[in-house]
Image (cartoon, rainbow, N blue to C red):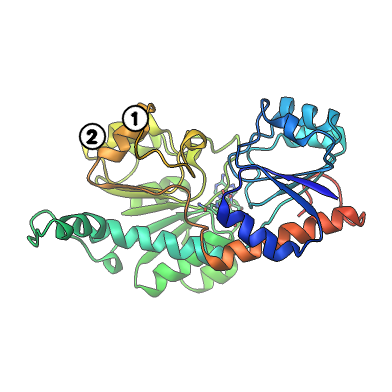
């Protein structure tokens, strides 16, 4: 059975080939899936995509008309998929809900420490032979309060890790995780979390309800000099409001592994091109901002797990074992 695999780099192909062992005919495209590239999946029953592929209504209708019946997402989040169209068309969809939460949680804690101790700034400085400590004054995170928004698989691990490092950890979620509460992690209202946290880390999925959860109003409720970490989805933060708050000092530091307009840039090499997105260009100039290109998941363990689960999902579809839309 043929599978059109979009948004693939060399590393994706390596792990998918390893998991596939020749079972399926994987047709690799490095291009992203959108309306203009959907024709590449003509007459191909399975389309395999990643975080920045477009699976809106128009693209889905085009794929369906071309014979595609299954979407195999190589990621956990499915905010880029128009699920109501998927349902109406009766397409099958499978994702990889839990490939390696540890990869993202460890990366998140790494970003917090890098910002608190200015490790990236120090790295750049010592490479120039500058060993002065001016401007590198950091703070102990063990004395701080961290607010975790979303305590699912990833957020729970971040909360536990930070608790282990001695932080006071507050959490907000639509559902409380009793195991976390038993560890002394306190569930509070969103307002209290904003008001009390020195560091805020986002781990909820992007939904229409929490689009721009971090905005002008909510930032004003936060502590002066707050640190914000986003390894979840870019559009949880209103970038314009964040830039204003960074300029005023209201936000003291920020690390973004995801960015609301990342689709045109992330996973690509722009080092010899002028970045046309003024917000991204501005964010890259702040000395107290770390931007990484949607890298938190990127470990050997996660890539292997994503590839295996994706091939298993396609096999389930082939054998008629896959349930309706939204199936894991
Ligand atoms: P999960 O489904 O296990 O947990 C999400 C949690 O968020 C749940 O407990 C849910 O109740 C909660 N939640 C939902 N809406 C909320 C809201 N409005 N406010 C507060 N909490 C809310 O998901 P996960 O595996 O922990 O992943 C979290 C997010 O991380 C994913 O949605 C994905 O967007 C992102 N992610 C990023 C990367 C990366 O490489 N940067 C990799 C994987 C996942």
Q: Residues within 10 Å of mark 2 (few under 14, many from 20)?
A: few
Q: Nearer the viewer, residue 5 or 54?
A: 5
In the foreground, 285 or 242: 285
Residue shown at 86% from the left, 50% from the top: 1
| The label number, if any, that marks residue 152 in the structure image | none
Mark 2–mark 1 Cα distance, whole angstroms, equals: 23 Å
Identify which residue is drawn at 92% across, 57% down: 319
Sequence-wise first label, 2 or 1: 2
Instruction: Judge left or right: residue 319 versus residue 240.
Output: right
| Dot 2 and dot 1 residues touching (CB under 8 Å) | no
Q: Which mark is residue 274?
A: 1
Q: Residue at x 23, y 34 (%)?
A: 247
**Towards the viewer: 109 or 277:** 277
> Can you give x and y, in whole percent of width and height, for residue 259 in the image?
45, 39
Viewer-side label of 2, 1: 1
Q: To which residue does mark 2 refer? A: 247
Lateral position of residue 183 relative to residue 223, left or right: right
């Amino acid at each position: 059975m043929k599978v059109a695999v979009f948004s693939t780099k060399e590393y994706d192909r390596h792990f998918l080939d390893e998991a596939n062992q020749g079972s399926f005919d994987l047709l690799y495209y490095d291009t992203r899936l959108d309306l203009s590239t959907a024709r590449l999946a003509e007459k191909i029953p399975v389309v395999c995509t990643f975080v920045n592929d477009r699976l809106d209504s128009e693209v889905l209708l085009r794929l369906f008309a071309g014979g595609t019946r299954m979407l195999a997402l190589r990621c956990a989040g499915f905010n880029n998929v128009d699920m109501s169209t998927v349902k109406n068309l009766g397409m099958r969809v499978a994702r990889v809900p839990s490939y390696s939460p540890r990869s993202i949680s460890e990366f998140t804690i790494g970003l917090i420490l890098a910002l608190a101790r200015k490790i990236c700034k120090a790295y750049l400085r010592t490479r120039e032979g500058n060993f002065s400590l001016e401007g590198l004054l950091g703070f102990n995170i063990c004395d701080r309060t961290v607010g975790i928004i979303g305590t699912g698989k990833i957020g729970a691990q971040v909360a536990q890790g930070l608790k282990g490092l001695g932080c006071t950890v507050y959490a907000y979620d639509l559902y409380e995780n009793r195991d976390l509460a038993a560890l002394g992690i306190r569930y509070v209202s969103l307002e209290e979390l904003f008001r009390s946290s020195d560091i805020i880390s986002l781990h909820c999925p992007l939904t229409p309800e929490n689009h721009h959860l971090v905005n002008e109003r909510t930032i004003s409720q936060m502590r002066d000099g707050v640190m914000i970490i986003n390894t979840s989805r870019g559009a949880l933060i209103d970038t314009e409001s964040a830039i204003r708050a960074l300029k005023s000092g209201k936000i003291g530091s920020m690390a973004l592994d995801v960015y609301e307009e990342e689709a045109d840039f992330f996973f690509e090499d722009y080092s010899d091109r002028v970045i046309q997105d003024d917000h991204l260009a501005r964010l890259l100039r702040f000395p107290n901002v770390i931007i990484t290109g949607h890298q938190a998941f990127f470990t050997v363990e996660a890539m292997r797990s994503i590839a295996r689960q994706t091939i298993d999902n396609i096999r389930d579809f082939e054998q008629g074992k896959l349930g309706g839309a939204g199936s894991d």
